[in-house]
Image (cartoon, rainbow, N blue to C red):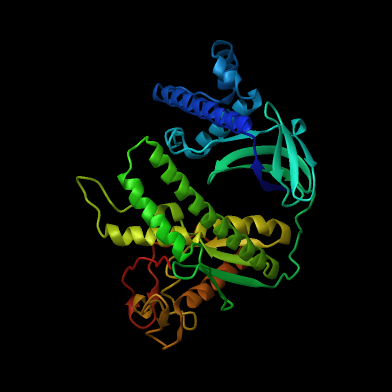
Amino acid sequence: MLTGRRYRLALTGEQAEQCVEFGHVCRAVWNTALDQRRQYRQRGGWMNYAPQCAELAEAKTEHEWLKVAPSHVLQQTLKDLDAACRTHGTFKVRWRSKNRWVPSFRFPMGKLITVERLGRKWGRAKLPKLGWVTFRWSRPPGGAVRSATVSFKGGHWYISFLVDDRQQAPDTHAMPGTAVGVDRGVKVAAVTSEGTFHDREFATAGELERYRRLQHRLSRSKRGSSNRAKVIKAMNRIMRCVIDRRADFAAQLANRLTADNALVVLEDLKTRHMTASASGTIEVPGRNVRQKSGLNRAILNKGWYRLELALNSAARYSGSRIIKIHPAYTSQTCHRCKEVDANSRKSQADFVCTACGHRDHADLNAAKNIRAAGLAVAACGDLGISRSVKQEPVSRATGPTPTAAPSAA
């Protein structure tokens, strides 16, 4: 089974400069190849990986700066671009801006990479044109290295190895009859149908205050100045800690859920669409922009999508199934009597059914509905998210209920 191992690099000054050069060359190749693809599409033609790879070899004879980076690293950049264009479309793939994109490049040939352990805390890896690079040995790679990705994040360089740990995914879970529903919210990161609330603070009060002050300094700094670069570097250091805590929380929770349950049910939440800006345009201004921006920050802070990725990764080792169901009406349906009424959701945390009077925590009630929907999907073999939800649910007492937007919490 393929898995990733990330380590923090301790590069020399010369190696750090080389990595920056590699990143800039890869960025230039990406942007040039993307522009070429878009020009071909505008004329009704196609440009794919193979001809671009041949043109890259010809371009290296004319432009010496292309020879700075290893050839297979540049070819891998073209492969990544080709995969992005096939998945998202040529005109939806983003440019790699010099100011916003962080250096990152991949060595795809594992046979050219050598990994050695130097001591209890340090190891080293031999990379093409970089030589031996030292990294913190936090854990053994645990398998043969297939590829290595070098990236810059939060003021530090990291190396990620793609390794084959030679483990096989189990056919069945150790406890095949277990199932759990998970409701992701903005107040509590995750609530399970068993009644467990999982949450933690990813940023301390001091970090939030420092970050707010740095944002004020950033707004007053001049673009392109050295002071602005220092402020951005300080902000990245704070965010690096926050992101690492969020990733740690998601990984631990995912391992716990998949180890204890053969079926994990989630709502099919489109996080990117849900966190889109509400500012609108000049002709059509947005509504409730400040409230929507606050909701977007809360959603992104809880790491909904990161938890989903962590569950899919952990499920490979436990044999669990991850099912996503449509999120419509999960927070408005009474788990006991199945009555659907938006008025039953009294507040963010309180749910009181208007039909049977059942009281419960709103997130816990939603998690129970999610679990029930997932069990129904698993029983009939449906995908869950492909069902039509155009027909409004019918209340037994009052007939069709008015259309109400599903709650994100």
Image vertical order of residue 368 relative to residue 237, above or below: below
Q: Nearer the viewer, residue 75 or 233?
A: 233
Quadrant of the rendered image containing residue 161? top right
Would you say 273 lies left or right of 190 here? Answer: left
- Which x, y percent locates residue 164? 76, 45
Would you say 185 lies left or right of 290 here? Answer: right
Image vertical order of residue 105 relative to residue 5, above or below: above
Q: Quadrant of the C terminus?
A: bottom left
Q: Residue sitting at 39 percent across and 41 percent down?
A: 228
Quadrant of the rendered image containing residue 404? bottom left
Q: Residue sitting at 51 percent across and 38 percent down?
A: 102
How many dots with numbers? 0
- Which x, y percent locates residue 332? 41, 74
Q: Nearer the viewer, residue 299 or 92?
A: 299
Q: Residue furthest left?
A: 283
Quadrant of the rendered image containing residue 123? top right
Is any atom of residue 303 visible in this view?
yes
Q: Residue furthest top?
A: 62
- Which x, y percent locates residue 184? 50, 66
Q: Nearer the viewer, residue 316 or 211?
A: 211
- Which x, y percent locates residue 115? 77, 39
Q: Residue furthest bottom?
A: 357
Would you say 33 lies left or right of 407 here? Answer: right
Is any atom of residue 383 visible in this view?
no
Q: Residue sitting at 43 percent across and 72 percent down?
A: 331
Image vertical order of residue 399 relative to residue 107, above or below: below
Would you say 137 lies left or right of 193 here? Answer: right
